[in-house]
Image (tube, grey):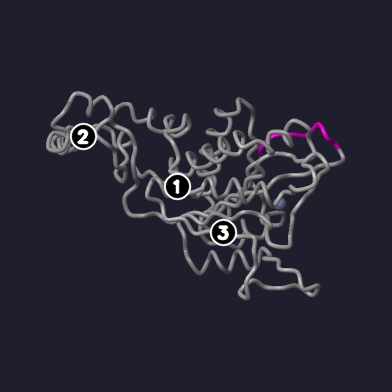
Amino acid sequence: MNEKPQAKENILAIINRHKHLNRIIAVAGGAAGLILVAVIIAVIVLNIPQESLPTNAVYDDGGKLTGILGEPTVCVDPGHGYDDPGADSELLGEDTAEREINFDVALRVRDILEFYGVKVVMTHDTNVPDDSIPQNGDGKHVIDPIWRADFTNALSPDLFVSLHCDSFPGDRSVKGTRIYYMSSAKGGKEAARVAGFCAGEIEKTFEGEVKLRNMTSSEAYYVIKHITAPSVLIEMGFITNESDASNMLSEEWRQKMAESVAAGIVNSLLKY
Ligand SMILES: [Zn+2]
């Protein structure tokens, strides 16, 4: 997990969206530093539409996005954890429940975001409890949604992204990713934007439809409703569906999902 993420396709997709800048840099050629400054000044003077250039992006000489200025903070929340395995299905085998998938993808998202200079805080970066982790009446270490919301609100991150897997034993044909947000919540407008970016990246990567769900106040998940930062909850797939479950057990799928989510987050952090 300590390995720096490679320049993966999804991340390249972000970069390709900034072809406009890439072209400018290509023209600037070798003496990139000074010329780039001149080009940026020229761009400002020429009043090129602002949406073509993120004001907080850092690029290398080849025009690849390498960082985001201002160290934005993202809270990544692996759903469940510790003694709470989350949903389970025989399709995942004996050693894996929802907890393991959420946690693994979350660590991958963290690593990619950190590569771009994003400060990542996780609600938990281990599943081995210590004294700070609350215990329920049965002595089980469980962090409930209230704990997660209080933890996150105390940090005031720029975004909160919770990762889960869905389960629907009643109809095993139900599959795919769903992203939840609440546009009427505090930060809800931005949450809708983040949800849209993540959905777009996941759809591109897996060539399938992602369902976006704007929740009402009465139906919204606790973390979506009570976290003051823009909050999205991603149900990455259905552990009760054969092909989703098989995907979730694969390293490749987890990495691709993490790259897509991270790309969506990075996109939404770029300011124009
Ligand atoms: Zn869950």
Q: CA distance from mark 2 to mark 1?
A: 31 Å
Q: CA distance from mark 3 to mark 2?
A: 45 Å
Q: Residue 137: image x %, image y %?
A: 79, 75
Q: Secondary structure at mark 3?
A: loop
Q: Residue 60: image x %, image y %?
A: 27, 37
Q: CA distance from mark 1 to mark 3?
A: 15 Å
- Nearest to the eye among marks 3 and 2: give it: 3
Callouts 3 and 2 close, C-beta under 8 Å: no
Q: Which residue is identified by label 3?
A: 125
Q: Which quadrant of the rendered structure holds the C terminus?
A: top left
Q: Secondary structure at mark 2?
A: loop
77 or 8: nearer the eye?
A: 8
**Residue at the (63%, 43%) spot, across then down:** 179
Is 142 positioned to the left or the right of 42 in the image?
Answer: right
Q: Residue 152: image x %, image y %?
A: 54, 64
Would you identify the image quadrant in which residue 167 lies?
Answer: top right
- Nearest to the eye among marks 2 and 1: give it: 1
Is 188 positioned to the left or the right of 99 in the image?
Answer: left
Say which amino acid is labelled 2: Asn
Instruction: Magenta stretch: give its range.
Output: 171-177
Q: Which residue is identified by label 2?
A: 47
Is 151 positioned to the left or the right of 145 in the image?
Answer: left
